[in-house]
Amino acid sequence: MAYFSTVDYAIFLIVVIAALFTGFIAYLWRKPKNMNDIEEWGLGGRRFGTVVIWFLLGGDLYTAYTLIAVPGLAASSGALAMFAITYGIMIFPIVYATMPRLYTVSKRRHYITSSDFVKDRFNSKFLAMLIGITGVVAEMPYIALQEVSIGYIFRSMSVPVSIALISAFAIVAIFTFVSGLRGPSLTAILKDAIIWVAVLAVVIYIPYKLGGFGPVFASAKNIFGANTPLLVSPVLGLGYTTLALGSALALFLYPHGVTGTLSSKDSRTIKRNASLLPLYNVLLMIVAVLGIAAVSVQGVVFNGVKGNPEPPFAIPYLVKDMFPAAFTSFVYAAIVVGSVVPASIMAIASSNLITRNIYLEYINKDASSRTQALLSRVLVLFIIAGSLVFALLPVASGNVVYLQTLGGAFILQTLPAIYFSLYTRKLSKWSVGIGWVVGVSMAIFGESLDKFSGSTLLPKGYDFIYLGIFALAINVVTVLVIHGIMAGMHKVKDEGIIENDELIPEM
Amino acid sequence: MNKYLKFILLALPYAFMTFGFGIYDRVNPEIDGWPFFYWYQLMWIFIAALLTSIVYAIERSEHSKQGVSS
């Protein structure tokens, strides 16, 4: 008899549909006078307080990446996957140091994207466009990661993947079109309720059933054998730490991190959340270790070779092995819902970049807020459609965690333009722009070294350092050298129109 | 608050997680079957959150003092 009965499919469908329906009714939540306004549609009217932002950023940052990609890497490569934990530990201090400043100036000057800030800080709409395009490009594989991961859930349920994926994300696209950022924000609250129930049940019951994590680590060690240790091999030490550092620095350079942040009602909300959001990291840690539990329970390494399951099946199979079908359907639905929220926010963030930093600057300077909102709404549909095409390609499978580190290698190249310029106005558009060109070229070249295999660790000759950090280092050196040369020739002009005290947050 | 103190508090997790890699890439001592590598990092999740909270608390209290005096 099949594992899933009709009732189980019904449970799955009801939970998913309830979440998607919430996305639609969010239109009515704190209903604005006019949804045809880019700040209302794209940032929820900048009205979200500590609690909503906690859910929103939680939903934005802890995604299918947490629930599928990281445990998958743990089930295929062991301790290397724990870079995601190390990364989680390093996220929030940098958020605390940078995001309240970006928020403060953005609220005063009605910025929607971080490129809006770059434009005024450097007085260069061209640099703003480069940074914006980097954001849109880097976001694509991240949206695809959500979709590919959900594809593995559908496969675990023996549902036809393409049709299910297209229908699910068509609905996401439409509710995003209708509700804007209110959609994923309200869904995020429901999502968290579902996810926490599912995850708490999983993290309490599974260790109980397996006799604690001790036996899990012990038996996984035997199954992994010598090649995949429960520690990071010292050879990969630099790769491990730079992957973690790079991912942490990258997270709030991504457009969706910025969009979530800018929808806060004040900078205190952001500072509070920089202290509260790390709670999610405990969840990330335990789910990652469950990837190792999957190896212990299934008795195989999830490396996708010789008939072994592919990495992203780690959590789906583990849950299936341990729970009755009705609860498994609930957990699967929770993971699907967990990917809907970030996919929606990412699509909104990318659309806003195209609208604000390409369309408004280069195509129609006089576009009203209404026109901007309308264009962003339509672009969401195209962005989700485009990412689906990418997600359905066979290349986007296996260790899906690399979809994230690939995007990260590119988005990191925007760090000098954003983080540095939040603290200094001395850099010019020339040094930062040329640094960007060098950094992005290095990122592309680095990918080609590995024949675009997807792994973002550089080859042995480079001590397996993470490509994103390597390229960023070259980028920063370039910025400093060119800045030094220009300063020597007295060519550095302060062109920015933002005064430094506009960045200082109110308490 | 002193901006160097703020910087140090916020930078500590980076120092311990990157340059401190050699400290935590080890199995022993284990706690309840968890290798050191895993429980040490679990502990750091809380330490990092605490450090950020301390910075926030100091900034808040300084702000409210200023509010009284000015």
Image (spheres, coloured by chain):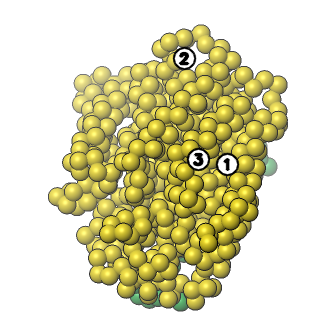
Chain colours: A yellow, B green
Q: Nearer the viewer, mark 3 or mark 1?
A: 3
Q: What residue is rendered at 52% in x and 60% in y?
A: A68
Count of labels in the image: 3
Q: Residue at x 73, y 60 (%)?
A: A11
Q: Mark 1 and mark 3 in contact (Cβ < 8 Å)? A: no
Q: Nearer the viewer, residue A320 or A140?
A: A320
Task: Give how far across and how far down residue A501 sits, in percent.
Answer: 58, 34
Between discs 3 and 1, the one toward the N terminus: 1
Rounded to the nearest angstrom, the CA distance separating label 3 from label 1 is 25 Å
Q: Which residue sits at x=52%, y=45%?
A: A162
Answer few, some or many: residues within 10 Å of disc 3's Cα (few below 14, many 20 plus, some between 14 and 19). some
Left or right: where A429 falls relative to A38:
left
Give me the disc on residue A121: none
Which residue in the protein does label 2 denote?
A: A360
Disc 2 versus disc 3: distance between alpha carbons? 36 Å
Q: Residue furthest front?
A: A1
Q: Residue A56 — which label?
A: 1
Q: Chain of mark 1?
A: A
Q: Is residue A464 above or below residue A378?
A: below
Q: Earlier in the sequence, mark 1 or mark 2?
A: 1
Q: Is residue A183 left or right of residue A119?
A: right
Apparent side of residue B30 relative to residue A366 in the rendered image (left or right): left
Q: Nearer the viewer, residue A253 or A288?
A: A288
Instruction: Give above or below for A365 relative to B25.
Output: above
Give the image location of residue A279, x and y in percent. Answer: 63, 64
Q: Give the left or right position of residue B69, taking residue A78 as reference.
A: right
Evaluate whether residue A496 shows in this view. no
The N terminus of chain A - image quarter: bottom right
- Between residue A65 and residue A436, name the one nearer to us: A65
Q: Amino acid at mark 3?
A: Ala
The chain containing the residue under callout 2 comes to: A
What residue does disc 3 label? A164
